[in-house]
């Protein structure tokens, strides 16, 4: 799903008076107080998360802006879970969570995962903890749990009101947090399923996407079993958020079948509460991996990059080329790309198509001198890497898109022909695998996330 331009939104929000939701008293939603400018910004917020594959984190207390900025610049995370409503949530006072905060994060490139933690299964011994209601476990004469179903629908209405006050627009996913419970307790299980069914019905009727978070071994397993063994008995959520702390950043678990909620309907919380530090800022988080909204690639593929009157510079291989001899001539496509790239730097003058020329030799030597490389009538893979990787050093990870991703893909294709990445501008699974392979070769933690340290080696031509 294409992401709409966010700069205008950010400009509008930051230019407005910083007036958003007032901190809500315990158990209440709070009252929205916004200026017309902020209201306009809220109306233009993008759907979240939409189509997104990559890493996310969640924390009880919504992080301050400086933390979000530091992690946006340095971490692999691009999605953040925040508790927006629900009487059972531990962080019911959210001083940082305002409509301005939401619009700012969306404008800067974050995806937001709004979470509701309301009534919990009655057999969960940790609830109620504030005197709030639990899921009604009483069955009617017909054996249905209509009271629990009604509770779920009511909670959905409350969650949508909270989301709309924060500027989270229809089409976004709203998540219900159903903490783990005893699935062997029939009344507890069936009432929890009925509650989640009511939640989904209510969320969808109000124009949002329904998501349910729960333990892999209870809520998620029960949903999957109901999907397969009792089709039509309960209304299934559009997306599931699996709590399974196995340390594996994917969306699979042995507790449920592989076919459910695929493609584009799963995320997994694969690591529980722990501290992580990025950009000098430490936050205690749960770690998640998301595959939501679309199949790979999850982001729009940008068209091939052409310059210099149509010269193709996105190549699957940038091999060593040199001035022709009587028995060998360099690849024409690579010669054309090299001429174009050097022309963009003001070093080559002339037509970009055609064979290697004396004019190109002179331009190559000028560039080699500028780059601190040995001057020769030859362009090595190292030289290609230095040329192609030049520029800013942003943190890139699965789900990243744009010209910086293209720059990375070209550079890896110059490092080795074994990568052969399509230069799409979408940081997909193939790019992630190539980055991990290259990182491991150079003694860098093979995280698949590319930061400044990796960029430095790429820009030095380390193959």
Image (spheres, helix red, strand yellow):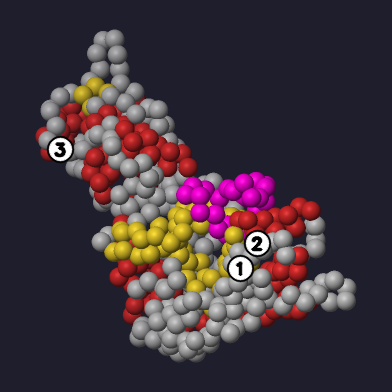
Could you tell me what secondary structure mostly forms the magenta stretch?
loop
The image quadrant that residue 37 belongs to is bottom left
The image quadrant that residue 285 belongs to is bottom left
Picture coordinates of residue 302, whole percent (x, y): 45, 48
Q: CA distance from mark 3 to mark 1?
A: 57 Å
- Of mark 2 and mark 3, the one earlier in the sequence is 2
Q: Quadrant of the C terminus?
A: top left
For the residue pair 316 and 175, the one nearer the viewer reads as 175
Mark 3 nearby-residue class (10 Å; few <14, some 14–19, many ≥20): some
Q: Secondary structure at mark 2?
A: helix
Query: Residue 23 colored magenta?
Result: no
Q: Quadrant of the N terminus?
A: bottom right
Q: Which residues are magenta?
A: 238-263
Q: In the image, is residue 106 above or below residue 36?
A: above
Please identify the residue farthest to the right as the structure is shown.
142
For the residue pair 279 and 419, the one nearer the viewer reads as 279
Picture coordinates of residue 72, whole percent (x, y): 35, 61
Numbered label attached to residue 383: none
Residue receiving disc 1: 178
Residue receiving disc 3: 371
Query: Residue 245 colored magenta?
Result: yes
Left or right for 62, reference 300: left
Residue receiving disc 2: 219
């Amino acid at each position: 799903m294409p992401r709409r331009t966010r700069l205008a939104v950010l400009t509008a929000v930051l230019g407005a008076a910083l007036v958003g939701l007032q901190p809500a008293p315990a158990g209440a939603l709070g009252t929205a107080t916004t200026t017309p400018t902020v209201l306009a910004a809220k109306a233009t917020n993008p759907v979240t998360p939409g189509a997104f594959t990559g890493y996310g984190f969640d924390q009880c207390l919504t992080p301050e802006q400086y933390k979000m900025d530091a992690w946006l610049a340095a971490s692999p995370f691009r999605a953040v879970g925040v508790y927006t409503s629900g009487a059972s949530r531990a962080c019911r006072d959210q001083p940082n969570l305002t409509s301005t905060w939401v619009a700012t994060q969306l404008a800067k490139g974050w995806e937001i995962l709004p979470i509701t933690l309301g009534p919990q299964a009655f057999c969960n011994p940790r609830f109620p903890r504030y005197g709030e209601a639990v899921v009604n476990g009483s069955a009617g004469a017909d054996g249905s749990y209509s009271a629990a179903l009604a509770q779920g629908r009511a909670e959905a209405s409350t969650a949508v009101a909270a989301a709309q006050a924060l500027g989270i627009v229809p089409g976004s996913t709203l998540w219900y947090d159903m903490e783990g419970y005893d699935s062997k307790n029939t009344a507890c299980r069936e009432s929890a399923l009925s509650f989640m069914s009511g939640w989904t019905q209510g969320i969808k009727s109000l124009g949002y996407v329904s998501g349910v978070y729960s333990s892999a071994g209870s809520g998620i397993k029960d949903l999957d079993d109901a999907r397969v063994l009792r089709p039509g008995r309960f209304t299934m959520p559009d997306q599931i958020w699996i709590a399974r702390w196995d340390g594996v950043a994917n969306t699979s678990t042995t507790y449920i079948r592989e076919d459910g909620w695929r493609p584009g309907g799963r995320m997994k919380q694969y690591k529980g509460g722990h501290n992580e530090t990025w950009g000098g800022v430490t936050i205690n988080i749960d770690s998640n991996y998301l595959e939501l909204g679309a199949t790979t690639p999850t982001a729009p593929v940008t068209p091939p990059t052409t310059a210099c009157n149509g010269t193709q510079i996105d190549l699957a291989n940038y091999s060593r080329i040199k001035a022709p001899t009587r028995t060998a001539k360099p690849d024409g496509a690579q010669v054309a790309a090299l001429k174009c790239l050097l022309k963009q730097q003001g070093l080559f003058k002339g037509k970009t198509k055609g064979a290697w020329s004396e004019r190109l030799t002179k331009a190559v030597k000028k560039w080699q001198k500028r780059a601190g490389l040995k001057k020769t009538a030859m362009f090595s893979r190292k030289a290609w890497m230095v040329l192609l990787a030049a520029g800013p050093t942003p943190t890139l990870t699965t789900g990243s898109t744009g010209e910086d991703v293209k720059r990375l893909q070209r550079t890896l294709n110059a490092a080795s022909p074994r990568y052969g990445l399509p230069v799409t501008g979408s940081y997909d699974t193939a790019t992630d695998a190539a980055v991990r392979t290259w990182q491991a070769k150079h003694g860098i933690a093979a995280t698949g996330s590319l930061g400044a340290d990796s960029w430095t080696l790429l820009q030095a031509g380390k193959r």
